[in-house]
Image: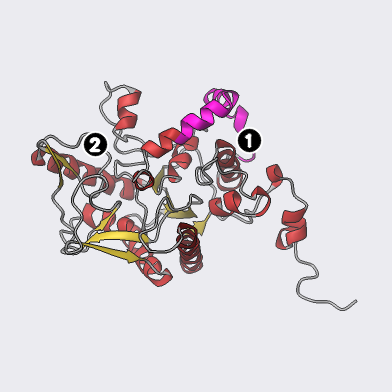
């Protein structure tokens, strides 16, 4: 038999051996992950709603989830959660797009190019256009909003300068922006504060080249203030709640996720300190065959999250392969609660997801 390049390749390169004959619980598409996160490393997160699961499991496993805005020590856990303290490493809410992330860094370090004062909510209340859902009911005055924003951006600077690992979950390519300033927004004005007008609000569906350009600028800026920082990119497996383009939401979802996945590949090829973790593939591809989605065919079930995070801790940390159900008492209790806890978890994610507001229109 003649030799050929495929003859001696390992099993994970062959669909039949790596997918067709593998049970769902054994499905593992992670190969040669380059980083090993230690328990003392400061791991910061940002991105779409799915990134919240990473934060939750980092805490459950006893790793150093880096939070720079923790809220008042006298506030109850329920209040802190409602006001999105510790949802991410800083209180920036959902950062769905590469454009938002790039501009977050620039605003934190003093750029005034994207200045937007506020979105009026009525009754003397105001929302921050860059994080419209972090303050239930809005701020009581413009002064309160400005003070909170200033201290928030100061903490964002601290986060970027002190973190060891930054995990960013790319979520969307569809992006609304303020025409006057070019400021990227997490949600369309009028959905959660502000007023929509074609004259003041623009829309862009980012291309691969645009996502790569945004992320390159961010990565170069981050390296400038923190040369030791390493970046882990993921793509959210959660489909779009709605598309602003007049086509089927599934078509827009496939476009968006494809762009983000290709962009992540280009970035990891160019930057040695950047790598990719296949959360998207674990949930959507191969043996999972949709089994990790809830009844709405969009919400990711806790079983799927546990599969993703189990592989993350196995390959990306010094914890190795630890059984998720036994890793902590808190997590074991969560598993024991069964389907009720899964439904409760999905409801919490919906509350903290700006994009979910579109599904209720």
Above or below residue 203? Residue 302 is above
| Label whose residue precedes the other's in the sequence (1 or 2) | 2
Give the residues drawn in magenta, as a range: 320-346
Quadrant that contains the N terminus: bottom right
Q: Residue 103, percent across and down?
A: 27, 58
In the image, taking residue 141 as reference, residue 223 lies left or right, namely: right
Tell me the residue at 18%/51% (across/down).
Answer: 195
C-alpha gap between disc 1 and disc 2: 37 Å
Q: In terms of secondary structure, what is the magenta stretch mainly? A: helix
**Marks 2 and 1: in contact by CB < 8 Å?**
no
At x 84%, y 77%, the residue is 3
Q: In percent of the image, x 17 and y 63: which residue is there?
A: 181
Expressed as whole percent of the image width and height from the top left, the position of residue 31 reads 64, 56
Residue corresponding to mark 2: 135
Say if residue 181 shows up in the picture: yes
Q: Which residue is mark 1?
A: 322
Q: Residues within 10 Å of mark 2 (few under 14, many from 20)?
A: some
Marks 1 and 2: which is nearer the front? Answer: 2
Q: In front: 326, or 122? A: 122
- The percent coordinates of residue 318 (x first, y second) are 57, 42
The quarter of the picture where residue 231 lies is bottom left
């Amino acid at each position: 038999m003649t030799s050929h390049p495929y003859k001696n390749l390992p099993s994970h390169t062959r669909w039949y051996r790596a997918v067709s004959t593998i049970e769902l619980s054994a499905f593992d598409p992670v190969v040669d992950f380059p980083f090993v996160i230690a328990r003392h490393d400061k791991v910061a997160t940002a991105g779409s709603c799915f990134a919240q699961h990473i934060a939750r499991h980092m805490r459950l496993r006893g790793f150093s989830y880096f939070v720079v805005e923790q809220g008042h020590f006298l506030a109850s856990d329920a209040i802190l959660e409602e006001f999105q303290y510790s949802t991410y490493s800083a209180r920036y809410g959902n950062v769905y797009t590469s454009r938002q992330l790039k501009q977050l860094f620039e605003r934190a370090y003093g750029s005034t190019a994207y200045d937007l004062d506020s979105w009026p909510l009525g009754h003397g209340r105001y929302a921050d256009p860059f994080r419209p859902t972090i303050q239930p009911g809005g701020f009581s005055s413009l002064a309160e909003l400005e003070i909170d924003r200033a201290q928030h951006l100061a903490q964002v600077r601290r986060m970027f300068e002190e973190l060891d690992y930054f995990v960013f979950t790319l979520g969307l390519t569809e992006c609304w922006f303020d025409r006057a300033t070019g400021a990227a927004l997490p949600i369309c004005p009028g959905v959660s504060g502000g007023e929509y007008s074609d004259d003041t609000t623009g829309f862009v569906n980012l291309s691969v080249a645009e996502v790569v350009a945004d992320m390159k600028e961010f990565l170069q800026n981050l390296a400038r203030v923190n040369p030791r920082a390493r970046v882990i990119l993921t793509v959210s497996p959660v489909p779009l709640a709605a598309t602003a383009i007049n086509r089927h939401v599934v078509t827009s979802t496939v476009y968006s996720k494809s762009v983000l996945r290709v962009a992540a590949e280009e970035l990891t090829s160019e930057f040695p300190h950047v790598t990719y973790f296949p959360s998207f593939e674990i949930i959507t591809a191969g043996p999972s065959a949709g089994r990790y989605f809830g009844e709405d065919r969009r919400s990711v079930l806790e079983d799927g999250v546990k599969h993703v995070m189990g592989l993350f801790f196995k390959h990306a940390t010094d914890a190795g392969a630890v059984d998720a159900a036994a890793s902590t008492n808190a997590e074991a209790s969560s598993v024991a609660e069964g389907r009720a806890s899964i439904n409760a978890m999905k409801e919490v994610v919906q509350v903290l997801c700006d994009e979910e507001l579109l599904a209720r229109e």
